[in-house]
Every structure is written in C-alpha cells, then in structure tokens.
Amino acid sequence: MKVIETEIKDVKIIEPTVFGDDRGFFMETYRASDFSVHCTEKSFVQDNHSKSKQGILRGLHYQTKQTQGKLVRVISGEVYDVAVDMRKSSSTYGAHIGVILSAENKRQLWVPEGFAHGFYVISEYAEFVYKCTDYYDPDSEVSVLWNDSDLKINWPLVDGQTPSLSEKDLQGIPFSQAPAF
C-alpha cells in the first residue's frame, strides 16, 4: 500500500499494491495495522455501496453528530471525488481536495471526520463503495451547495452540463452558512 499526502494534511490518497496477470488481479483494499499508522486508529462500523449514472453528483455531505470518516473507492467506472475541510480551527478550513477515483486506477481516498464529501460520475455509470467510522445519522446531515462560489471546486462536468442532483442536494446551503467543526 502506498499512501500519498495531499495539500490537506489529514486527507490521504491510498494506492493498493495490485498483483495481476492474464487471469485477473488481486489487491488488499484495507489492512487495519497499516491504516492506523498512516490515517487513523478508528474502526469502521458501516460499509456502503451506491451505483449512479453519468452526470449524477452526490454531495457535499457531512454530519454534525456521529461524524463519519470515510474510506472511499470506485469498483466500476470513474468519479471525481471531493473532500472539503469543515474544521473551523484548521489552517485549511474551506479548502478542498479533488481526485479521480476509478476501477482502473484502484485509488482510494481517506476523508476524515470534519470534512464534507461528494462525488460526480464521469463514466457511463459508477459503483462507489466506502467504509465509515460511525453510523449514518440523517437528522444531523448537512448538504453544502456543490457549486458554492466560496469553495471554487472545478467539477469536470461532462459536456459542461449541470449535474443531476437529489432534492436534498438541490436544497443545499452555502458554505458560509454551514455549521463548522
């Protein structure tokens, strides 16, 4: 496993070691001992799996209670994945990291507690899986506007089209009004 530091200290890109030949491949996607050294010692309590069509944007979400760290990856297709620092005391408050995650590059992104998270589907469809350090709590979920001008996220929109959003994300709030940690 190779851990790549990002511009935001606590967000990490993880590249697994892949063993492959003409029969296929094998890779270890998670090992607690390595993860605790490079990312966090917290345990994962919930795994999630979603499938989305091209042009769908999910996010930017976080919870104010039962905050979740997320280890995310794509098992089919390709997405642009974003983590936004919502920690008011952080020197990178309001900054974001955006990376391409795909079944082909097999990269993972560690998004710690205190970050809003979202992704945009670039390929025809994508299957997205992630581990969480706490349980989903819909009553404390916040959705920040995906296109908030304060965040300056350069989403790689297919053909420049407006993404398809859920009702919750259409009602997202500006970053300036979002509760910070």
Image (cartoon, rainbow, N blue to C red):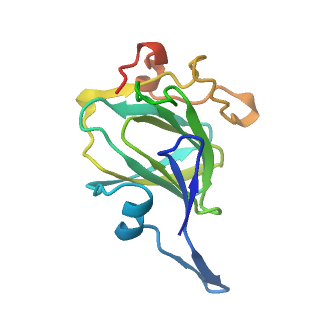
Give the residue drawn at x 29%, y 55%: 42
Give the residue drawn at x 59%, y 49%: 125
The residue closer to the viewer here, 133 or 102, is: 133
For the C terminus, the quadrant is: top left
> Splitting the image into 4 quarters, where does residue 23 fall?
bottom right
Say if residue 174 shows up in the picture: no
Q: Residue furthest right?
A: 159
Give the residue drawn at x 47%, y 20%: 170
- Tell me where residue 91 appears, x and y as whole percent: 50, 29
> Splitting the image into 4 quarters, where does residue 14 fall?
bottom right
Q: Is residue 98 left or right of residue 41?
A: right
* Residue 36 higher or lower than 175, as above or below: below
Give the residue drawn at x 61%, y 56%: 102
The total number of labels drawn is: 0
* Residue 130 higher or lower than 164, as above or below: below
The residue closer to the viewer here, 16 or 52, is: 16
- Tell me where residue 177 appears, x and y as whole percent: 41, 13
Q: Is residue 66 left or right of residue 57?
A: left
- Tell me where residue 154 appears, x and y as whole percent: 67, 30
Say if residue 92 shows up in the picture: yes
The residue closer to the viewer here, 92 or 100, is: 92
- Tell me where residue 129 appears, x and y as whole percent: 44, 55
